[in-house]
Image: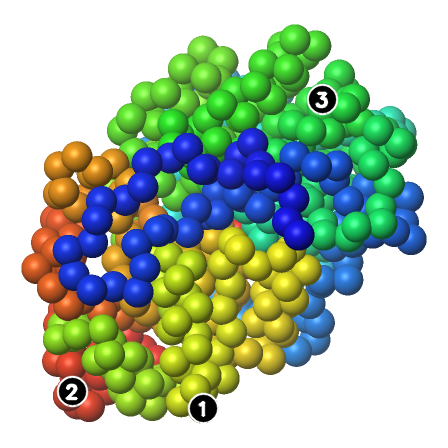
Amino acid sequence: MSEPAATDDKTSSPPPPPAQHKSWADEADDDAEAANETTAPTTAVPSSSSPSLNVDELSIDENKKPPKLLDDPEDSNIQAVTSGDTPYTSAATFEDLNLSAELLRGLYVEMRFQKPSKIQAISLPMILNPPHRDLIAQAHNGSGKTTCFVLGMLSRVDPSVQAPQALCICPTRELAIQNTEVLRKMGKHTGISSECAVPTDSRDSLPIQKREPIKAQVVIGTPGTIKKWISFKKLGVTRLKILVFDEADQMLAEDGFKDDSLRIMKEIEKFNSSCQVLLFSATFNDIVKNFVERTVKKDHNKLFVKKEELSLDAVKQYKVRCPDELSKIEVIKDYIFELGENVGQTIIFVRTRQSAKMLHKSLVDMGYEVTSIQGALDHEERDKIVKEFRDGLTQVLISTDVLARGFDQQQVNLVINYDLPIKHTAEYTREFEPDYEVYLHRVGRAGRFGRKGAVFNLIYDEKDERLMSKIENHFGTRVSEVREKSVEDYKAALKEAGLLQ
Ligand code: ADP
Ligand code: MG
């Protein structure tokens, strides 16, 4: 039996407009927004005194994948607007940042990084140096934003204080777990403790009231669980020095987690008005941008990228016109899988849970090994599917937008948009509006840190045509067509993307 619906389960958001054509489902998967939260007591790994998930069990055997070191993946402009007269010098090396020897070891030995990426070089001096101003930072997908805020959190913690001093809030459990793993790896030699605040399924854990307050110095989690831990006085906020929102535009969007995020911010402000706030995302649309600038302190710094410069050049985008739903599946298996078999891992994005199930079943029935993830699965199942994909045990993962943002798996070279992401705001007009931000984030699951990648958008009716051309106009890019049954076209596309010889 499932837990009661969550406070951040987006049951109140308007349904998408009725589909004009036959489709497998018309209910988008809402759990891109951590709908997996529950209001029932958070459960714990029973053997542990800690109230949360054992992230270490989920961590990946890194020996299997030696990192390829690339040059700086970004050469486009990040515009900086700094506040006051604090001069900031961009950091050419990690040494320039006055990091502790333990953190440098984490960066070089554990992470195997050589030098800061562009966003790291620019933002880290702003984050790390007094007066520790708030920061709104936009930078490309896969450009290394996590390192910016993880180093920010780790460097601000006073190791002698056993209380939460840094808090990071993320939209999904997958992202909270991933960020916790990065923090533990990067901070391995610092001795700094951390806790991942996401719900677990386990039935026989202590009710929240009976748990010990959190002593971990860094807490990373999803808004529902964090809010609950704070309201039950298990997560103290008085010692917090730094608060991070990853995927901040979604965390502060009206149809995202705005209410939760603001409540948490206010609660912290009550005790601690000087807590540094960092907002990171690859996307900030104009509405959100306006709003976020008003939520942080007046003297904040900001970094922005023009929307036309946001598409990743390293990821080539294609469209395939398919006459019907069935032919979409044929395109996937007979062409994309056939030719793209050895190019790396693939994520197929679908809009609805129902489509995820149906596509999964169809491909499995045809003998393909694929897995799928969506918000209706229980937490352990979700964690298992992600781990198998990260370990390389599965090559193809079907996902709703639950993994559209933040998910970092360097081996993902192919993204297939089984359907295009649409905004939930068109219920009266019947005019479908693409969700530009989600599109960009989906594309950004390939091409991590300058790696190569390709995206195939499967489109099959007038509505899709319009959505596609709106997306092209918005980002000022051209998405080339690959003819549905032309092996040559697919080959040429993969070659152009640098994925085939
Ligand atoms: P973003 O959040 O900006 O989308 P991530 O922080 O997830 O990107 O980083 C993308 C990938 O780049 C990760 O696999 C990360 O380990 C790698 N990466 C980040 N910074 C560096 C660096 N300075 N050198 C090499 N690899 C890096
Ligand atoms: Mg990220």
Occupied quadrant, residue 495: bottom left
Of marks 2 and 3, the one in the foreground: 3
The reply to whether callout 2 and callout 3 are in contact (CB within 8 Å) is no
Q: Disc 3 or 1, which lies upstream in sequence?
A: 3
The amino acid pointed to by label 1 is: Gly
The amino acid pointed to by label 3 is: Ser
The reply to whether callout 3 and callout 1 are in contact (CB within 8 Å) is no
Q: Is residue 350 left or right of residue 89?
A: left
Q: Residue at x 73, y 29 (%)?
A: 229
Q: Which mark is residue 231?
A: 3
The amino acid pointed to by label 2 is: Lys
Q: Residue at x 65, y 34 (%)?
A: 39
Classify 10 Å Cα crowding around label 1: few (below 14), some (14-19), many (20 and above): few
Q: Disc 1 or 2, which lies upstream in sequence?
A: 1
SS class of the residue under badge 2?
loop
Q: Work out which residue is located at the far front of the displayed protein and give it.
A: 1
Residue 195 seen from this side: yes
Q: Is residue 259 left or right of residue 302?
A: right
Q: Disc 2 or 3, which lies upstream in sequence?
A: 3
**Which residue position holds label 2?**
485
Q: Which mark is residue 439?
A: none
481 shown above or below 122: below
Q: Residue at x 32, y 21 (%)?
A: 290
**Which residue position holds label 1?**
367
